[in-house]
Image (tube, grey):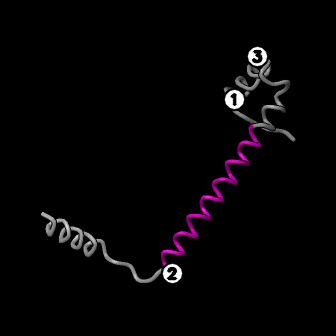
Amino acid sequence: MTITMPAELADVLRQTVAGGEYASTSEVVREALRDWARNRDTERRELETLRDAIKAGLESGPGISADQVFAELRARYEAKS
C-alpha cells in the first residue's frame, strides 16, 4: 500500500521516528489509523444515541411551542413576586 501525504506531515513522521518515539513510520501510521477508527466508532455511537433521543422525543407526544413555555414561566415567576 502506498500513502501520499504533504511534505510537512512526512517530515513530522520522519522526525518522530528519528527521535525514537516509534520504531518505524509504519508504526506511527498504524497508531494513527487505530485512533481514527476509535474516534469514528465513538462518533457513530454518539450519532445513534442522538437519533434515538430525537425519536423518543418525537414519539413522546405533541410538543409545546416556545412562546407557550415562556408565557407559563413568566406567569409562574410573576406569581411568586
Q: Position of residue 32 (x, y in %)?
A: 74, 38
Question: Residue type at mark 3?
Answer: Gly
Q: CA distance from mark 2 to mark 1?
A: 48 Å
**Depth-wise, is mark 3 or mark 1 nearer the camera?**
3
Instruction: Reply yes or no: does residue 33 show up in magenta.
Output: yes
Q: CA distance from mark 3 to mark 2?
A: 56 Å
Magenta span: predominant SS is helix
Q: Position of residue 2 (x, y in %)?
A: 84, 39
Q: Is residue 7 left or right of residue 53?
A: right
Q: Is residue 2 left or right of residue 11?
A: right
Q: Residue at x 58, y 70 (%)?
A: 52
Q: Position of residue 7 (x, y in %)?
A: 70, 27
Q: Check disc 1 and report its element: helix, strand or loop.
A: helix
Question: Residue type at mark 1?
Answer: Leu
Ranked by sequence position, the earlier of labels 2 and 1 is: 1
Which residue sits furthest right?
A: 1
The numbered mark at residue 59 is 2
Q: Residues within 10 Å of mark 1 (few under 14, many from 20)?
A: few
**Depth-wise, is mark 3 or mark 2 nearer the camera?**
2
Ranked by sequence position, the earlier of labels 3 and 2 is: 3
Q: Which residue was labeled with disc 3?
A: 19
Q: Check disc 2 and report its element: helix, strand or loop.
A: helix
Q: Residues within 10 Å of mark 3 (few under 14, many from 20)?
A: few
**Magenta span covers which residues?**
32-58
Instruction: Reply yes or no: does residue 41 show up in magenta.
Output: yes
